[in-house]
Amino acid sequence: MQIFGFNHHRFMSAFVKALGLSLLMVVTPLSASDISGPAPDFTLKSKSGENVRLQDLRGQVVMLNFWASWCGPCRQEMPLMDEIYKKYEKFGFTILAVNVDEDSADADRFLDAVPVTFPILYDSESRTSEMFGVDAMPTTIMIDRDGNQRFLHRGYKPGYENDYRKQVKKLIRE
């Protein structure tokens, strides 16, 4: 998020590292709500080295998750998201987990400790997170088969994964 030319994600990442709080950072869940409107298109490099474009996933339900290596709730949420991914992938569902760390090596170290099977994308300049107005870690946006944003979760607390499952099922059935 740019505020007066200031990159909020980069500042927070550097600040948290400077304090030595890398995985102790706690983000209070802010809200879960219905949203609407087309999801902005983007293309990002994936962990596998390929470019992934959101527009190319039209026809699928997409769980777009913004996360950071220093985010404690992200560490808790990722394995639960992986279970959802494995269960619903065959029904036209995918997860795009967009890492906002300035250095992708930080994300890769996180993923060594918390391995997942869904696609990981790198947004090291926070351009995509800014397009989606991300202001909490993690932030999850459910996108329907037509490319419209439908549900927004800011932050994470235990139980959100139940909401994710319900929303994924609802969007898959549409």
Image (cartoon, rainbow, N blue to C red):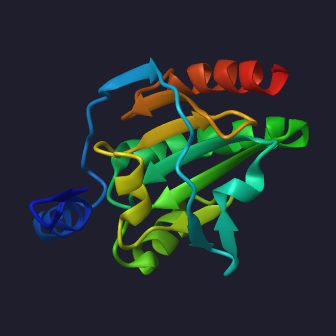
Residue drawn at x 51%, y 24% is 160
Name the residue rendered at 34%, 45% in the picture.
133
Image coordinates of residue 20 in percent, x first then y, are 17, 65
Q: Quadrant of the N terminus?
A: bottom left
In the image: residue 30, left or right of residue 96: left
Q: Is residue 121 above or below residue 77?
A: below
Q: Quadrant of residue 10?
A: bottom left
Q: Residue at x 67, y 18 (%)?
A: 166
Q: In this view, does 146 lie above or below 21?
A: above
* 91 relative to 103 in the view: left or right: right
Please identify the quadrant where the C terminus is shown: top right
Q: Would residue 156 be found to the left or right of residue 47 on screen?
A: left
Number of numbered discs:
0
Residue that protrudes farthest toward the front in the picture: 37
> Could you tell me residue 30's position as x and y percent?
29, 27
Displayed quadrant of residue 120 = bottom right
Residue visible at 44% across and 20% down?
33
Place of residue 99 in the rendered image (x, y in percent of width and height, measured from the top left): 46, 62
Nearest the viewer among 38 and 59 is 38
Is 144 situated above or below 44?
above
Q: Position of residue 131 (x, y in %)?
A: 40, 53
Q: Which picture quadrant has residue 42? A: bottom right
Q: Report whether residue 118 is seen.
A: no
Q: Name the outermost residue toward the right.
A: 90
Residue 10 visible within the image? yes
Of residue 146 and residue 97, the one placed in the foreground of this image is: 146
